[in-house]
Structure formats: structure tokens, C-alpha cells
Amino acid sequence: MAPRFGSECEPPIAWSCPECGLFQLETGGRPFSQEEEAAVASLGPAAPVARRQLSARSPKAASQARELLATFRPDVPVDVEGLAERIGYPVRWRALPRHQRGGIEGGPERRLLVLNRDYPFHNDAERRWAVAEELGHAVLGHSALVASDEPGHARGMLEPGRAAQERDARAFAAELLMPAGSVRRGFEREQSIILRALGSDERAQAVRTVIAGLAREFRVSPQAMRIRLAELELLH
């Protein structure tokens, strides 16, 4: 996956795959709409990126997620809401501005992870990702004013440090929902499907089959699983 930038001084707003043409927002959410694809295409050619840059992002955030996994040893798929409850961050539904998927409420003594009851979550995977991101914000000590927006929602200006906090929360969510060791074992179990494929078309279909199967196993979106496999250097 290669990054797409809105400007040279901001983090990537999306990732694109030169092999399959996938556009993925810089989130665990949905792919671009046709209108959003056209907008991103107008930004110019994708900049090359070293694969290790992806897996090296936000190491502290990923480490925090691994610590939780090591402590509570949840099964796959991780019960992210149950885990949040166990460590003192219960999930509640509230009415929020429509573009916000969720946020954090409360003070130092008691915080709630809030999901927007009016937000049109498309599926269970998107809801789980939103919970994992908000849990990341809470565990990493981010501002209680942090709120996760819908993919593609443009803010006029990010408050100081917001972009870095969002990257950290996404790294936390990826490690929590798709633990590196479990994903590697799952991919190794299914890799023969890809290895048996003949020709580029058959291989591309085999890759999609493996990604879809792992996404169902971990209860994440296929887009999130594809990016995770690339981060772990399991897909090239």
C-alpha cells in the first residue's frame, strides 16, 4: 500500500494498492466512494513508501495493546467491548454529531467510551474498530475531547497533536483486533491457497479469498486485514 497525501505537511489521508486498485482511508473503516476516489486521484501520483515504515508506526501504541493482550489473553476474535469493560472503560451509546463515530466522556476517575447511536455503522467490523480506536485513545491518555470522525470527514483544523493521537489510536486498534502473532499463524495456515494459484488473476483471487477468510475470523473489515498483512510483510 502506498500513501496518498492532501499536502506535504500532513500525514497520509489514504492508502492505495497499485496491484488491486484499492483505495483505503487512513482508518480501519470503509473504502472511498467514487467521488472520494476522484478527489484523491487529483492529488497526484502516490509517493513510494518503504514497507517497514508502516509496521514501525506508533510502536508505543502497539506495545500498549500487546500488554493488554498478554495480561487478559482474550481469544480471537477479541471481545473488544468486554475487554474495555474489564479495564474500566465501559462502552455506552449517546447522541453525538452525525459525523462522529464515537468519543470519550468522563474524568480521570471514570471514563466512558461513547459510540454515536445516530451514526450509520455499516457492519459489526466498523463498530468494533471504532470501539478499539476509542479504547486506544483512553489507554494512551489522549484528551477526553478526542472523537473519531467518519472516514473522509474533513475538519477545518486539527488541534495540536490530534493527528499523532489518531495514528496512535489506529495502531493500537490494529494490534488489539489483529494481534501480530495470531495474524501470522492464520496467514501461514491459509497461505497454501495463494501458493497453489496459477497466473496473476488466479493469485489475485486467492489473495482476496485468504484476506476475506481472515477478516471473518478476526471480525474486521477486509480492507483493515489487507493493510495489516502488508504491515506484517505477509503480503507483497
Image (cartoon, rainbow, N blue to C red):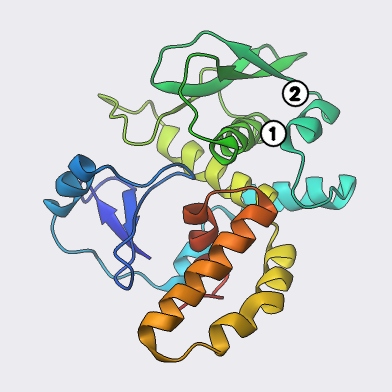
Asked whether 230 or 142 is in front, the reply is 230
Q: Where is residue 83 in the image (x, y as percent from the top left)?
A: 80, 35
Residue 236 against residue 175 in the figure, above or below:
below
Choose top left, top right, bottom left or bottom right for residue 194.
Answer: bottom right
Residue 91 against residue 67 in the figure, above or below:
above
**Residue 91 in the figure: left or right of residue 144:** right
> Residue sitting at 34 percent across and 28 percent down?
158
Mark found first going from the N terminus, 2 or 1: 2
Q: Where is residue 98 in the image (x, y as percent from the top left)?
A: 40, 15
Residue 161 against residue 103 in the figure, above or below:
below
Q: Judging from the image, what secondary structure is the residue with disc 1 in?
A: helix
> Residue sitting at 55 percent across and 64 percent down?
211
Give the Cα separation between the discs numbered 2 and 1.
9 Å
Q: How many labels does the image show?
A: 2
Amino acid bearing label 1: Val
| Residue 25 in sight | yes
Q: Name the residue under label 1.
A: 139
Residue 177 against residue 88 in the figure, above or below:
below
- Look at the image and tell me in which quarter the C terminus lies: bottom left
Q: Residue 89 carries which label?
A: 2
